[in-house]
Amino acid sequence: MGLVEFSSVFMLDGIEARVTPDSIHFGSVEIPMAGGIPRFVRPGETYSDGNFSELRKKHATLQLDSVNGTTDRRMTLLSRTNWEPTRLRDKLVLECGCGAGPDTEVLLSLGGRVLAADLAGVDVARNNLGDRPQLCLIQADIMNLPLRPATFDTVFCHRVLQHTPDPERTLRHILTFVKPDGDVFVHSYAKTAKQMWNWKYVLRPLSTRMSPETLYSFIKRTAPALMSVSEAMCRSAFGRRIHYVMVPFRYYGHKEKFRTLTREQILEYGIHDTFDALAPRYDRPLSAKKIRAIASEYLSRPFEVVESGAVTLLRTL
């Protein structure tokens, strides 16, 4: 991948990196490589193991627009950032938490040069995205990134912040990497009654104590029946509101952007996202007030914090 092309962005404890196609060094410290990817954390020893890593193995390409035939990730990204499609062209982008690469694919298609970091899933992302000079994947903790401060044109963090052990510290850390005139987009679940009054927060005290394998198996077995209930309830706006609060299954069959998907694909999305709601070790949304206060400390250009339904968005203007 584009490790050599991205060599100038790496820094660890104030020491610049020396990068070759198959190694990365910070003074006497050598970072191990596997599959062409620097491993700043050891595989199998992170809080993503068993939950997010489980999903990426079982549903590796589910969310990629190029595979499922939708424009869901592209349109969601453009809508939530409120940026023109040309805004990322030739920009150096730090993606904090790439997963299997569905947003990475979009960032690259918009012309970005992307350094994508994740605790787990980078091998799946590599398989999905292939080798590209404009992409560098690293396995790293976004709470402790080995990067040069104030280096990136864009810092992008989507659907990740609330799943870190300390979202406030994570947000402060990732904001140090954007240039003074750079762009920022950070998504968090909203800390509102609408978001918190939901079946997942009732069930998570139990589901997070289950093994990921047991939880996934249970969700997969019950999904067909719950999807039938969901289909019936989501035919009306009132039914959708009750479903959101009461039925422990993520259902998207009523959404226009998923009209092209088969029933089997809708079921797979439901299994994936229901597990994604119940399995993560951490789910700690930050309030819009806290996000605004932190952003005010770090960002020199105008920004806004938008609290919309179940999500809170920080984005430069």
Image (cartoon, helix red, strand yellow):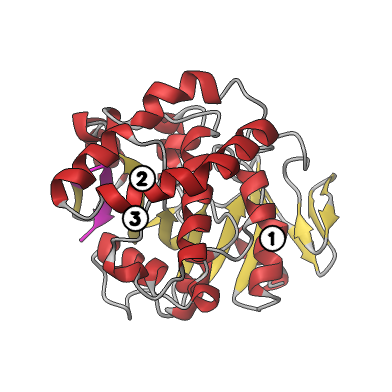
Give the label, 1 or 3, closer to the camera.
1
Where is mark 2, residue-wise? 229
- In the displayed structure, 290 sits above or below 33; it is above
Give the label, 2 or 1, closer to the camera.
2
User: Which residue is at a point 42% across and 42% down the rendered structure image?
Assistant: 249
Residue furthest to the left: 238
Q: Which residues are magenta?
A: 306-317
- In the displayed structure, 265 sits above or below 86; it is above
Q: Is residue 243 visible?
A: yes
User: Which residue is at a point 68% across and 37% down the rendered structure image?
Assistant: 50
Whole-percent x and y of residue 25? 80, 53
Q: Is residue 307 visible?
A: no
Q: Quadrant of residue 156?
A: bottom left
Mark linked to residue 185: 3
User: Which residue is at a point 50% across and 49% down the rendered structure image?
Assistant: 224
Majority secondary structure of magenta residues: strand
Q: Is residue 41 left or right of residue 197?
A: right
| Among the two numbered marks 2 and 1 on one chain, the one whose residue lies closer to the N terminus | 1
